[in-house]
Each structure stands twice: as structure tokens, then as C-alpha cells.
Amino acid sequence: MSDAGLLLIEGGQFLDETGAWTAGTLSTGARIVARARFDAPFHATLDATGCYLLPGLLDVHIHGALGVDTMDADPAALARLARFCAAHGVTALTPTTMTADPAATLAAVKAVAAAGLRPHPNGATLLGVHLEGPYLSPRFPGAQPAESIRPPDLDEFAALCAAGPVRLITLAPEVPGALELVAAARARGVVVVTGHTAASYDECEAGIAAGITQATHTYNAMSGLHHRNPGTLGSVLSNDRVYAQLIADNIHVHPAAMRILARCKGVARTVLITDAMRATGLPPGDYELGGQPVRVHNGECRLADGTLAGSVLTLEQGVLNFAAAAGLPLQAAWQAGSGSPAASLGLENEYGTLHPGYRGDLVLLDRTHLTVVATVIGGRVVYLTDPARLSGDRRGHDPDGPGAL
């Protein structure tokens, strides 16, 4: 549809104020106008028969897909990533870097700036950069190149923020200089995330007191929970100020541990992520992450030494895995992929619900198979599996766009 028009979505079911599924009609442009037919001309109508209407998903930790990676420092690669995300119900994302030398990290940030913070043609909106490192613990590098891990550097961080839209930074709060960098990040409005950390419980709590509000891929690459040494995990699970990111691929985290996380944090403080790397959406085989060879086999991405190296998870599948593991209904688990990540970025008044005034970003999910049928961003249909569902002005949907990926 044209940017000036409204999209009418009919025949689907969405959540009403009581939390029950109800049949309804949604009118939306760049913002949702009404949960009813609106007295205005509609430029297009989308048939949602047999579908749930849900707010778009947000992925705050994703490296790449379809052969591209944030570290490629290529705006065209970011556009390809944005289109892939839209095909899986993700309407906004923060492309995520790997720990690398200063020049490579700076180039990646500049590429996001060049790509722009906007909905991409037939793709999701870029919300800014997630810097994963380089100020991490060498004791918990995970798949981050250990040789590039370095102490916090306020000048380097300032240069990165000046180069582009840094939205989050993952760091280890126990390393010397980390708390000063936390303060500098918060002063710039950057969300600070604890991760790849050997922090004790007290050190993690000190980081949270300084301004850390999230934990990167909870359970993974952090000091674990012991009844006499609660570690980073103990702090994350017990501190209500922290949003806990979770890779719900049934590989990084056992389903029982997902259930424990859901009970400790609730869906409102659980943030589902993919941590997807460039092999996502492609066949098994040999790939690369952060300059390191990665073998993808049976859905697992591993370095030569067996270390997990990101995932090939898509976020809508992560929601379904989390729902099954935690024993949650779809609508509750979906919040952990939509409203919760939005709130974790301070965007709870923009994303995560279908109320009037919120962004016109939503997903049609087949009620039988729970697969993405259509994705709408800013009132435009950017992904559609069945062209017959869309009538009227079709300029918002490109049949050669993400549906052809």
C-alpha cells in the first residue's frame, strides 16, 4: 500500500483486553489506527482468515543470515538480513557485531549508519547496533575471538558512538574500567548488557547498580549458579531489574533450564533472541563467524574445538520452543519475543502490542501450523506467502521480495 493510505486487515483473531482470542478487524498505517473498520479510504485489504494477529517480533541479538553478517560492514548485506528477518515475523532488529579489531568494529557501525534506522524495502527496521564486545572476559570468550578481547576503552567507545547508532553493548562488568564504561554508555542512552563474563554475584550486582539492565544469552558464557557462589547467573535470575536474553533453540539451553528462567524472570523480563549467524537459512556445511571456521550440523554451529558459535534459529521458532519448554500459551511466549525486547530498549510505547497509536508492525500466524503467513511493517505488507490474501494497492508488497528468499 502507499505510505499515505491505510491497510485493512480482516478475518483474523487477536487478543482482546481480557487476554482471550477474538475475531476482529484492524486498521493501520504507519501507526495502528483502530481495532475496527475505520471511517477512511483503505488502499489495500489483507485477508487474515485462519490466522492469529500478533505484534511484530524484535531481535536484539542477531549477527547474520543467508550468508551475510554484520561484520561484513556492507549496507546491502544488512538489507538482505532485514528482508530475511521480515520473512520470519521480525519487524525490528539490532544487528550485532563480533569482537574484532577497532577498525573492523568501526566499519560495521558505520555500515549500519549508512543503511539507516528505517524499515528497509520489504524488510525489518534497523534499530541500531548491538556491540557484543570487545570488552569481555578472556575466561568466557565463547565464540568471540579471544585475541581481540581488550580492556574497556572510553575513547574507542566514544568513537564508535560517534560513527553510528550504537544501541546496546555487551561487556564483562568485573574487568577493570568496566563500570566507568557502563556510566559512559548510560549517559549516551546505550543499553548495557552483561555477558561473556566471569563476574561473581557481587560483581554482577555492582554492574547492575551502575546501570546494566540486560544479560546476553543467559546461561551461556557466564559464571554459573552454585548454592555457595551464585555467580552471574544467580544475579541475573534473582534481580528483577535485569532482562534475560535467551536462545531458545533447545541446543544452547535445555528446556528445563528455559522453564526455570521463565519462572524466575517471567515473560516480561525474558527476551528471546536468535544469536543467528550467517548460516541461518542455508544448508548445513562450513561457514565463518568472527574470522573463525564454523561447522553447522544437525542445527548446531560449532568451532573446531566444539564451542557453540551462534545459532541458525529463527525467532518465531524460538517463541514456539520457549512456549513448549515453559508450558506457556502462545500469546504469553510471544510477549518474550515482542513486548519484552521492546521494553528492554525503552520502546514499550512503540512496539509490542496492537493497541491504537503503536507502530503498525504485526505478524499473521497460521493458526494450525503456527507459521508466518504475512508480515506488516508500518502498515505495509512486506512479506506474504499467498498473494491472493492481498487486494487493492499492492505497491507495499514485492513478489520478488522476502517471500522469494
Image (tube, rainbow, N blue to C red):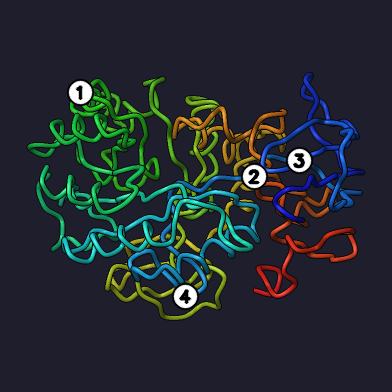
Amino acid type at mark 3: Thr
Mark pair 1, 3: CA separation: 44 Å
Q: Quadrant of the N terminus?
A: bottom right
Q: Earlier in the sequence, mark 1 or mark 3?
A: 3
Cα distance, mark 3 to mark 2?
A: 14 Å
Three-letter code, disc 2 = Gly
Residue 30 placement (x, y as % from top left): 67, 43
Neighbourhood count class around disc 2 (C-alpha, 10 Å): few under 14, some 14–19, many 20 upward: many
User: Which tag, 3 or 2, sits closer to the chain's start?
Assistant: 3
- Sequence-first disc among 1 and 4: 4
**Residue 28 circle label:** 3
**Quarter of the figure that contains the C terminus:** bottom right
Left-right relation of 389 to 2: right
| Tag 2 residue | 56
Give me the disc on residue 403: none
**Residue 286 point in image, percent of width and height:** 41, 80
Residue tagged by mark 4?
67
> Which residue shows up at 35% across the image and 71% down it?
72
> Can you give x and y, in whole percent of width and height, for residue 251 in the image?
49, 55
Q: Residue furthest bottom?
A: 285
The quadrant in which residue 386 appears is bottom right
Q: Of the residues tagged 1 and 3, which is closer to the observer?
A: 3
As shown in the figure, which amino acid type bears the numbered disc 1? Ala
What residue appears at the point 57 percent right and 33 percent down from the top-left corner?
350
